[in-house]
Amino acid sequence: MPTDLTPPDPAPVLELLSAYRKSKVLFASLELGVYEALHQAAHSTETLARQLEVDANALDRLLHANVMLKLLDKTPAGFTNTAAANVYLTQSSPQRILGYASYTDAVLWSMWAHFTDAVREGTHRWKQTYGLDGPLFSHFFRSPEQAREFLMGMHGYGVISSPVLVNSVDLSRFRTFVDLGGATGHLTLAACRRWANLRGIIFDLPIAVELANTIIAESGLADRASATVGDFFTDPLPPSDLYALGRILHDWTEEKILVLLGKIFAALPSGGAVLIAEKLLEDSKTGPEWAVLQSLNMLVCTEGQERTLAEYAALLERVGFTNVTGTRTTAPTDVVMAWKA
């Protein structure tokens, strides 16, 4: 019998039991309009409760929870947004991730309720949750405005990562940067801004290209960046010596990835390359935390998963790529590059 009767630290278990409550503080604050109301000026609980038409005592608890989570500051003048809340959680910010936050609450939250079934069956939960036959985000967008705001959420996420990515690799030898599924163009614009030798092309579906054109026009890079409508699975790819796939491959099965990589390989000239932006799992697959949890999210809402560098290298080499390298970054995304000899 063990002689040490001291129980283990319960903190890891207790933290997980309450982790979802922190997410709901964020989601409820967004839905009620807390961050928007506090964007320009501080407000007392009572003033904000009248403005938002909510119970003052309940709101006061919500506001203090936001302070604990470092989304609000409490000052003598009242509550106000932190810098992070202003940049990422208000409508006027070009770096906002509101669309993705709303999507996480309104869509993914319900799908994750069926996570155990996803593990049992090894498939996404679109059919079980919403009656949809596939993980097609467009099915859930009931208006162009919803789709646009989701894309802006992805844009805000990309703005965090893309400048770090294009500074972590040498792209000086390339002339054309074609971003397949490039959405708003954050990766393309970051690449063109960092590497003066590049001309960038965003290749995506019509709703994304429409928004990308607006962002390109405001970027100061319209002379070197453009957007073209196309489906990378079915349409011919624009000619390029460098193709980029930013958070694309983790959505798909190995079979579909091989089809896409094979298509890219065939389109590249000798000496061309592909740049893959994904968060790499460690070889142990126990870290980094973001990649481990995102791989589970891919199980819930897509056909894909996160992968190690070795797993990406195996896929790339199967279609003919060589010299596969990986660069880990401080951003939520890493870089894999591979070459056509």
Image: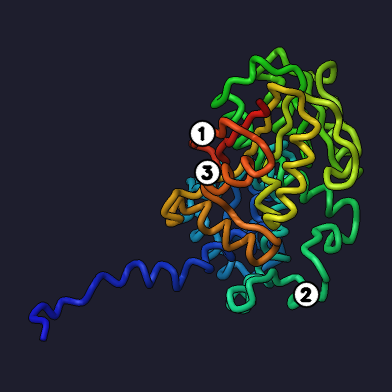
Cα gap from disc 3 to disc 2, whole angstroms: 31 Å
> Is 186 in front, or is 307?
307
> Is 248 in front, or is 38?
248
> Is 193 in front, or is 181?
181
The quarter of the image holding the C terminus is top right
Earlier-in-chain disc, 1 versus 3:
3
Residue type marked 2: Lys
Earlier-in-chain disc, 3 versus 2:
2
Residue in view at x 63 percent, y 33 percent: 162
Give the labeled residue for mark 3: 309
Residue 275 in view, yes or no: yes
Counting from the top left corner in percent of width and height, residue 46 is at 60, 60
Give the labeled residue for mark 1: 327
Residue type marked 1: Thr
Please state which of the two labelled residues, at mark 1 or mark 3, is closer to the viewer. 3
Give the labeled residue for mark 2: 127
Residue 270, compared with residue 64, is above or below; it is above
Residue 183 in view, yes or no: no
